[in-house]
Amino acid sequence: MDTVSKVREYVVENFLFGDGESLREDVSFMEEGIIDSTGILELLFFLEETFGISVEDHELVPENMDSLRSIAGFIDRKLNGSSAAEA
Amino acid sequence: MIGVLGHRGPDETGLYLDDRVGLGHARLSIIDLSSGVQPIHNEDKTLWIVYNGEVFNYVELRQALERKGHRFRTTSDTEVVLHLYEEEGPGCLTQLNGQFAMAIWDAKKKELFLARDRFGIRPLYYTIADNTMIFGSEIKSIFTNKNITREIDPVAMDQVFTFWTTLTPRTVFKDVYELPPGHYSKISDGKVTFKKYWDIPLFGRREQHALGPQEVCQRVRELLEDAVRIRLRADVPVGCYLSGGLDSSGTTALVVKNFDSDVRTFGIRFDGDEFDEGEHQRRMVSHLNVNHTDLRATSEKIGASLPDCLWHCEKPLLRTAPVPLYLLSEIVRKSGYKVVLTGEGADEVFGGYNIFREAKVRRFWARYPDSRSRPELIGQLYPYIFNNPRLKRTLRSFFAKGLDRTDDPIFSHFIRWENTSRTKAFFSQELSKAIGQYDGYEQVRQSLPADYEQADDFSKAQYLEMTIFLSNYLLSSQGDRMAMANSVEIRLPFLDPRIVDFMARVPSKWKILGLHEKHILKRSFEGILPHEVTSRPKNPYRAPIRRSLVNNKAAGYVREVLSEEALKTAGLFDAGKVTRLLRKAQAVESLGEIDSMALMGVLSSQLVHRQFIRDFSPGPANSISPDLVVDRRSEALKATN
């Protein structure tokens, strides 16, 4: 399963409670109200556990966390050792 | 009908019947214990009243009426209200300083008059079926009539899951309405009319006081002292709720220092620092040297009592906070008390809520949306969620929503309501379809009075808070209903109309000075309360949700009403999503804000559906033997023959 699919499955199960049909890769979690502040921490825990990465405080910005696509890009950059986007 | 309201009036019951009307009353005796049984009539028995509540200035009103020649049979406030109505008609309402719902039958004019106090402290519901108006203090009394259809109103569900409550006059039950606060109704000749006699005051700058802050505080102290004084009028002992916060500490201190140094106080304690105010409560108990009783509201007790609490609320809840107040009134009653003073209303009148300050900061931020420093002020309002540096940017994005909509009349509340609306994702397709294109925000915008637009930003936010949240949530689900469930009356000095009117004329800049909430009230209480109480930031009253609902005490009914079968029978929620939500709540240690509200909203809706739609039963208390029966049916029939 690729990165986007793994994250999608988690988000659909835990934040959309199974209703994932309209979750496109570029949908903003914040703007669409999919994930709130507590949810961001839950998502972070999942990403760190699942992908074996460590997310620094300064990396926890909407540009890295706000959609399936931005999360996938962020994870790929982390796994490839390049620096993550910072705002 | 009155049998099912025994908790509101366990002391006496009475009936009036003629060929047009039937009035029933269940009495909680507080003033004139021996001769106050209702219905009460005027001198020539042409007017009959049933009345729930208190008018605190009845002593002064009675003196004036006696000077005009009125003669009284009792010493009750009820009889004063009736004679004042006889003298002035609906115009009497603006003279009443109190909390009431009443019905007056004019047997001569064949006209029924229904009225409710300014803020809606006391409830009054009605429905019209087969050309008959059926009314009562609680909806369950209306439902005892087997001809009434019991259905959940889809639009009301949309409102509850947006605003935390229905928008007046709607209730969660189809075709059952509340008489809105500050309104009266007349029913005669098959016609029903409604009229607003009072509204939350909105004064323009020209109508505001020219007094300085010091004079304002002096006047507030005088008004509050008098508001407390007349609210101690009772032929039974009066206690006080004491939470440890500014408002209840202030009212209790005024009682102790001026009227009753032995007053009995009652407070709620929680397990865990997140919700508990025990330290502050203890400080006030020691400062005032009062006889205090506290209730420990454990999560298990909250979970176990939720179904009973909802029987009294008669609407879904998104918070568990009402339940501890239900448990507290039980302790009050068991301690031999029927009446307590509470601090409710101060946050609305004096500017205590974060939502007021939040709107102020967001307007300030909206002038320079790219500013990095302005949004930092939001962090000062919510230190308990901004203390995690990892969330700073996310929260900033959250509060930046709608910054371009400062002209929207509902700007102050938009974020809160949008946030709550996310819980509607759990609605079933069937319910969403029935709600259709209904737009609750637009309904609120359309309901605003002409002078709203001229009011300052804070007064606008205050108006929204008082017309939507105060009456239908704070004063009912968290107020009258939770107290009356155990036959206890709450009295609210901060909602004395003289205080509300006076404070509406105080410039907003003094109410929230900079970002300091309730500035005027804090200064008014200086010298009466310890500095620790007047200087500490407000800690909102909350109760745990997840751990109250996911525990052994609640497990039985949670499993039952959230089963796929029960969810499908009610048809309100998507069973698959709710199952996932419950699974998540059981798996995690803490549940997010939206998920918590959704869990509570779904569960409470299902319980309301079970209690009032599927299995409605008025219970064994439905049969009573009235203490007073006035049966004029035969006389009326003779007159028509």
Image (tube, rainbow, N blue to C red):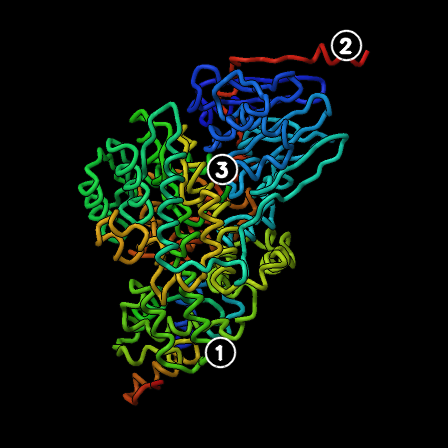
Q: From the image, tell me which residue sits under label 1.
A: A26
Which chain's residue wears label 2? B
Secondary structure at numbered mark 2: helix
Query: Which residue lies most toward the front here?
Result: B67
Which chain's residue wears label 1? A
The residue at 39%/75% (across/down) is A1
Which chain's residue wears label 3? B
Q: From the image, tell me which residue sits under label 2.
A: B638
**Which of B70/B504 is in front?**
B70
**For discs 2 and 3, the disc positioned in front in the rendered view:** 3
The residue at 55%/48% (across/down) is B166
Secondary structure at numbered mark 3: loop
Please tell me in which quadrant of the rendered image residue A51 appears: bottom left
The amino acid type of the residue labelled 2 equals Lys
Residue B133 x, y percent position in the rendering: 67, 31
**Which of B307/B419 is in front?**
B419
Q: Give the alpha-carbon distance from disc 2 to disc 1, as whole Å.
A: 79 Å
Q: From the image, tell me which residue sits under label 3.
A: B97
Residue A12 x, y percent position in the rendering: 44, 65
Please tell me in which quadrant of the rendered image residue B259 appears: top left
**Which of B29/B323 is in front?**
B29
Q: Give the alpha-carbon distance from disc 3 to disc 1, as whole Å.
A: 58 Å
Label 2 with label 1: CB-CB less than 8 Å: no
